[in-house]
Amino acid sequence: MSATGEQDLYEVLNVTVTASKAEIKKAYHKAALSSHPDKVPEHQREEADVQFKHISRAYEILGDDDNRAMYDQHGMAAFDKGGASGFPGGAGGPDLDDILAQMFGGGGMPGMGGMGGMPGGGPAERRRGKGRNEVQQYEVTLEMLYKGKTTRFASTKNVICEHCKGSGGKEKAKPKPCDSCKGKGATTRLRPVGPGLVTQETVPCGTCSGRGKFYAEKDKCKKCKGARTVKQKKILELYIPRGSREGEKIVLAGEADQDPDDAEPGDIIFELVEEPHKTFHRAGADLQAELDISLSEALTGFHRVVVTHLDGRGILLRVEQPEGQVLRPDQILRVSGEGMPFKKSDARGDLYLTVNVKFPEDGWLRNQAAVDRVRAVLPAPEPVQFAPGETPEAVDEVDFEEVENMDEFGGGSDDPRAGAEWEDDEEEGAEAPQCAQQ
């Protein structure tokens, strides 16, 4: 026991105040195993149950670095209002609200409740709302979004135990109030937030899992073992409407885990994530794709299937070039009504085809006669026209070579326009800049 009469947590775990975190954990496992109510004769179980809570509470505080620092500085006053020890029968000791009042000149931190627990009664009384939603991403292909998709999958979730109706105990068995939280289901503690500053926070009680009460081992429900819920597998159906978009959410109402403390279970929410497509790029209800054509087709037109759509249909395009018109690189052809469908509508967006002209491979003109025939059918090049004052005074014929890129442009210079990286003045061996002498 400490000088204030509270039970020393280090003594509870039989470790010294200088014990490492690993030593505290090891001591906790050893003490918990020897003091577990199931490991002692029946006539000693009540006493063992109390001691087991002491051990659990001690490890809850000493096993956390922040909690341990607060305990070393303030003792159990940093964690429990009702008594200095924080265990059954504890009494006396400074009140945490008094500590905060001395530090901040009032009844605790602004916006924080007193140590009397969270407002509104016990945890079950406070919660009684809708349970927590489960949100997860769901990857979909563009084909699935174009045609719509229904998927069935098996889901395993927690459901309220029918045997004990979610109480966790046997019929007519009565739970015991938790001594650690005094039946509140939550404890409050000080947490450092800066040099010389602490904040007060309320956390679920680790001894009773926030319930404020618990059943002895012999009184627990045989089916759920006191957990109040059991696992259940169910086949769910997920329907993705055609025309759905990236980021849209599909809600399966009430299919999340059940909790006896909730008025109703939460939802499972799937957020759609559109996978990149190898052919199409989507923007809203419109689609875009590359249209690869040959030089011959660019000059003379074509009539063929240009792309396979998302539903497997081939898109047949007839392109005729009247009066010598040609298709040029990056030209855009729009096909109305061949984009993505609008939700709940028969209307569709448009398909945009970006022209990409593929030139013949080297060597297709095998001799001069072939070159002459091509020149004969192609338009003659227009003569070069120089602006006034720009006519060259002399003409030099020069040789050339092909290069793959512009990487060597400005090479060896420190001109930033060449893309050269700035050199680091602190490179190894470089001299530091000298200040000019006055």
Image (cartoon, grey):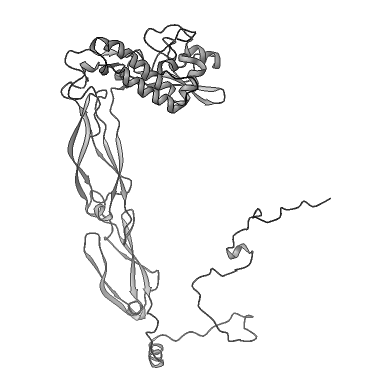
Name the one closer to the observer, 14 or 428. Answer: 14
Most distant residue in the bottom direction: 369
Name the one closer to the observer, 49 or 305. Answer: 49
Residue at x-position 58% and y-position 81%: 386
Residue at x-position 33% and y-position 46%: 247
Most distant residue in the right direction: 438
Q: Quadrant of residue 189?
A: top left
Residue 153 to residue 216: above or below: below
Residue at x-position 21% and y-position 22%: 166
Residue at x-position 27% and y-position 16%: 37
Where residue 231 appears, x then y in whole percent? Answer: 20, 31
How many numbered badges does the structure rendering display? 0
Q: Which quadrant does the N terminus fall into? A: top left
Can you see residue 140? yes
Where residue 114 appears, x then y in whole percent? Answer: 44, 15
Residue 309 to residue 346: above or below: below
Where residue 359 appears, x then y in whole percent? Answer: 38, 77
Residue 189 to residue 438: above or below: above
Can you see residue 208? no
Name the one closer to the observer, 106 or 290. Answer: 106
Name the one closer to the observer, 344 or 102. Answer: 102
